[in-house]
Amino acid sequence: MRRIVTFASIGTVLTLAALFALLRSIPAASAQADSASNADQIRRGEYLAHSVAMCVVCHSPKDEHGQPILSQQFEGGVIPAKATYPKMATWASHAPALGPLAGGTGEDVVTLLMTGIVPRTGKPPRGPMPPFRLSDEDARAVVAYLQSLGS
Ligand code: HEC
């Protein structure tokens, strides 16, 4: 009987040790998963900003061919066109640098990209900034990408 108890308690200790090891490994594993999903999010944001929503085209200085200068991407750009409608007064001649706007929590830019409204003013930006309706996930990916550039 005594022997059985001893075996049983060894079993319990081993089980607890295994459980302890497992629990210790969980934070490390989820930290790895976090950084992997953060890298995925940034890649998605880059894809959206360069290939889908084309933020880079308007928000960067352009070379003599009108192509965005990638070494200065998102530092702000001149809009090389005027509104087609004479009475459309709300057309901007310049798209601002995005680094400072996406800084901090970036929540205002997330809201802008999801609703088309600038929270600071309660209004849409002037044209030709498109009135985006990105999903929450995509808006956050674009902001995470802009923040990852550290500009
Ligand atoms: C067709 C050109 C164009 C594209 C594409 C574009 N923007 Fe803009 N954006 C502008 C212009 C012009 C302004 C300035 C509007 C103003 O001055 O009212 C602006 C303003 C902004 C602002 C500042 C809003 C504020 O006043 O706080 C942010 C942030 C912004 N854009 C982010 C983006 C992001 C992110 C993308 C891509 C998802 C993007 N823009 C795509 C032209 C563009």
Image (cartoon, helix red, strand yellow):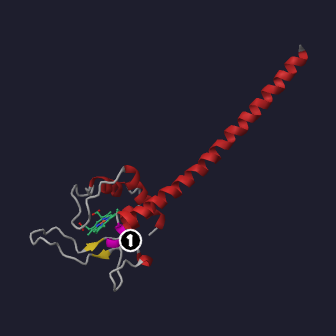
> Is 50 rendered above or below residue 63?
above
Report how many numbered discs are placed on residues in the image.
1
User: Image point 58% across, 49% down: which residue?
Assistant: 33
Q: Percent position (x, y) of residue 20?
A: 72, 36
Identify the image quadrant of the N terminus: top right
Q: Along the horizontal axis of the image, is 47 left or right of 24?
A: left
Q: Main secondary structure of the magenta part?
A: helix
User: Image point 45% across, 62% down: which residue?
Assistant: 145
Residue 57 falls inside the magenta stretch: yes
Q: Percent position (x, y) of residue 14?
A: 79, 31
Judged from the image, the quadrant occupied by ligand 1 is bottom left
User: Image point 39% across, 66% down: which residue?
Assistant: 51
Kindly give the residue lying farthest to the bottom in the view shown: 64
User: Image point 44% across, 64% down: which residue?
Assistant: 46
Q: Percent position (x, y) of residue 17?
A: 76, 34
Q: Along the horizontal axis of the image, is 12 left or right of 29?
A: right
Residue 149 falls inside the magenta stretch: no
Q: Along the horizontal axis of the image, is 26 left or right of 13?
A: left
Where residue 65 sits, quadrant-wise, is bottom left
Q: Percent position (x, y) of residue 8?
A: 82, 21
User: Foreground: 81 or 3?
Assistant: 81
Q: Which residue is identified by label 1?
A: 74
User: Foreground: 100 or 77?
Assistant: 77
Callout 1 amino acid: Phe
Q: Along the horizontal axis of the image, is 107 left or right of 85?
A: right
Residue range of the region highlighted in magenta in the rendering: 54-58
Identify the image quadrant of the C terminus: bottom left
